[in-house]
Image (cartoon, rainbow, N blue to C red):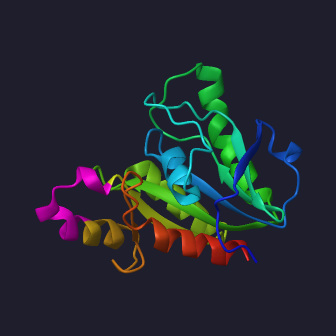
């Protein structure tokens, strides 16, 4: 069983889900473009393993990170507004769905939403899709530093209510200063086994 993600390393990028090697177990990250999935992965690992860009849609492939002992973290392309070739953007949805639906080793999906913006219709659609395909997922609100402190508790409750979970079940994180990252890391390590 893994005790940390500190040895996590990038191993491959792929556009064809069927070409990704099998893992013992894996956790995938989904969310809209520019929500901070790559920054979150870096925070969870305690170092820069994923490329971070300020341009929406820079993650264009299935990016695989080996956490050790055949356990993967998987950064999937973002949905929604993105900059890139239209033919690539149109392929991201089917690529993500095929990947998530076909991976026997997938233990959990981390659905990342923007804490300040709140869940979008596309986030709702993803949550419903994961539920209908019986894929375990946890909801993580990133960029909590962008929420005014006086509004933080109410916003956390609102995001949780949107997904039908309690505020305690929602992971409320700031990748920059590590707020909430340890709790999410523990959940991911448990899922990876």
Q: Position of residue 15 (x, y in %)?
A: 76, 35
Q: Quadrant of the N terminus?
A: bottom right
Residue found at the far top of this picture: 85
Which residue ends up furthest to the left in the rendered image? 150
Taking the spot 65% from the left edge, 78% from the top edge, the residue there is 190
Above-or-below relation of 97 to 180:
above
Q: Quadrant of residue 148?
A: bottom left
Locate the C terminus and report the quarter of the image it occupies: bottom right
Q: Say left or right for 57 vs 153.
A: right
Residue 169 location, x and y as percent?
A: 42, 78
The answer to if 166 sits in the magenta stretch is: no
Q: How many marks?
A: 0
Q: Main secondary structure of the magenta part?
A: helix
- Residue 30 visible from this viewpoint: yes
Q: Is residue 98 left or right of residue 154?
A: right
For the point 68% across and 50% down, the residue is 97
* Residue 100, position as x, y percentages in the image: 71, 56
Q: Is residue 15 or residue 43 the one in the foreground? A: 43
**Residue 78 or 49: which is nearer the viewer?**
49
Q: Is residue 161 left or right of residue 61?
A: left
Seen in the picture, residue 131 relative to 111 is either above or below; the reply is: below
Quarter where residue 61 is shown: top right
Q: Position of residue 173 (x, y in %)?
A: 39, 62
Residue 188 image-quadrant placement: bottom right
- The residue lying at 19 percent from left, 69 percent from top is 154
Magenta segment, which residues? 144-155
Residue at image location 84% in from the left, 67% down from the top: 24
């Amino acid at each position: 069983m893994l005790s940390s993600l500190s040895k996590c390393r990038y191993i491959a990028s792929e556009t064809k889900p069927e070409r990704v090697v099998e893992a013992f177990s894996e956790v995938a990250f989904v969310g809209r473009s520019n929500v901070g999935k790559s920054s979150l992965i870096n925070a969870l690992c305690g170092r820069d393993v994923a490329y971070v860009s300020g341009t929406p849609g820079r993650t264009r492939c299935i990016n695989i990170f080996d956490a050790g002992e055949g356990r993967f973290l998987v950064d999937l392309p973002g949905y929604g507004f993105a900059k890139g070739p239209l033919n690539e953007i149109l392929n991201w949805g089917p690529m993500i769905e095929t990947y998530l639906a076909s991976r026997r080793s997938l233990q959990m999906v981390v659905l990342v939403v923007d804490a300040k913006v709140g869940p979008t219709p596309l986030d709702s659609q993803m949550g419903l899709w994961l539920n209908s395909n019986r894929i375990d997922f946890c909801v993580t609100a990133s960029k909590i530093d962008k929420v005014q402190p006086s509004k933080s508790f109410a916003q956390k409750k609102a995001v949780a209510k949107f997904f039908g979970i309690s505020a305690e079940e929602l992971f409320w994180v700031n990748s920059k200063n590590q707020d909430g990252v340890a709790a999410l890391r523990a959940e991911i390590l448990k899922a990876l086994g």
